Amino acid sequence: MFREDQLKALLSGRRILIAGYGREGQSAERLIKRLVPDANYRIADGNEQIAAEAVKDYDLIIKSPGVPMRIMGGVECSSLTDLFLQVYGDKVIGVTGTKGKSTTASLIHHLLPGSILAGNIGIPLFDILDELNDNSIVVAELSCHQLEVLHRAPHIAVLLNLFQEHLDHYDNYMGYKMAKMQIALKQREGGHFFYCTDNEELCDMVRSSELGIQSSLHPYSFNDISDEERTLLEACPLVGEHNLSNALVACRVAALVLRQPLSSFRAPLSTFKGLRHRLERVGEYGGITWYDDSISTIPEAAIAAVKALGHVDTLILGGFDRGIDYSPLVEFLKENPVKNVVFVGQAGRRIYSSTHPLGHSATLVEDDYTKIVPWCAEHTPQGGIVLLSPAAASYDAFKNFEHRGDFYREQILKLNQN
């Protein structure tokens, strides 16, 4: 195994707690058993058990991403991401941001032949150990939960944007933003940090943190691109300025890594296939075009989706309410009215309470997608567009956003069969 001795050194002779036993906790146990078979370790799962164990005398606590820091009793933690980056950080391109990180990480991976895609996208970093060698390039999608306890950040880091998100996990919005900023603050000298200056929250955080950033800064803006970049992005099959901005930074990162001109990425960029549930065109059924943007869990994502499509006849909003500020979405709908709107869950009801005086032609307050989809078909004109872009999480009714998007698609197909 590549750099096995360095990994063993991090784990050997230590009393270890695995805090959380989901996908990453199980991956941590596999790693320990493989490298240090006689290791002294314990597993704690569930917040109550983790909180009780964390304050005991452990040398190393490997915290899973879903475990809130506030239950850890103030003790220092590590994580699988942290351990991986301590050993392999020089081989990693890390991508984070409130929105767009999966698409951007996948784009970079697509543009870098032979690279390995892992991280928050569904592949635990330590599950790729046997693929690594001295020439490896790892493209890692990183969530705020994976970044919050870093000791070393990736050699190349991309931070796309910052919006209100995961307020149920952090004490406040600043806690969330600081977790994201670790991808820059924990870089070593000689690293590279790409960030989008079109996002005010992000610019403010970089300005206030600049003295703590040791790496080279690579600011970029979709609003200030060269003729060469404009020509390059004409080849991008994704729609919407937010997606084109993500394609821009993906190409810039690839150009840095491969030391090639941006123009050389036009052909590979044109063959990229968008990810599921991200402004995905489900198809045309009953003379109506249906889009699945179930990944949209914040107002800014729904706004970007409506802008990208240009004209939306029916919009499905809402789901699990995490206390996010919906005023930007309400203001957008005032200036860009959508004919029909469906309001789902507690988040939908809160949005409805602010938007119902706007004069939509038709509204529906409903949680059942078996009723929502037929209603959309009935109220959307021939040639029109129905967009699921909820601006809310899905956990009140679904396992995750993928489950929500799949169920929405199933109802559309059933409608077509009838």
Image (cartoon, grey):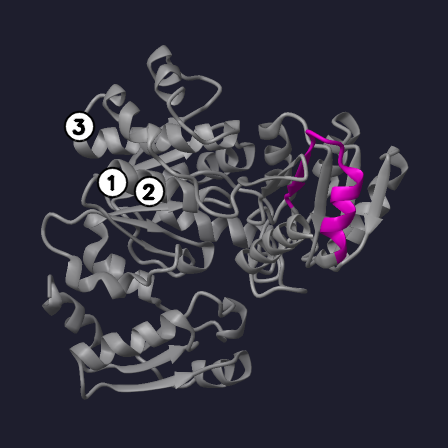
Q: Which residues are magenta?
A: 371-389
Spatial separation of the CA atoms under disc 1 and disc 3: 15 Å
| Residue type at tag 2 | Ala
Indicate the position of residue 78 as horizontal and vertical percent values: 35, 67
Q: Which residue is mark 1?
A: 191
Given the image, on which type of amino acid does mark 3 rest? Arg
Q: Quick check: marks 2 and 1 in contact, CB under 8 Å?
A: yes
Residue 33 lies, in percent from the top left, at 22, 81
Q: Is residue 353 left or right of residue 203?
A: right
Query: SS of the residue at dot 2?
Result: strand
Q: CA distance from mark 3 to mark 2?
A: 17 Å
The nearer-to-camera label among 2 and 1 is: 2
Badge 1 or badge 3: first in the primary sequence: 1
Q: Which of the 4 image quadrants contains residue 149?
A: bottom left
| 184 or 25: nearer the viewer | 25
Mark 3, residues whose alpha carbon is within 10 Å: few (<14), some, or many (≥20)?
few
Residue 155 covered by magenta stretch? no
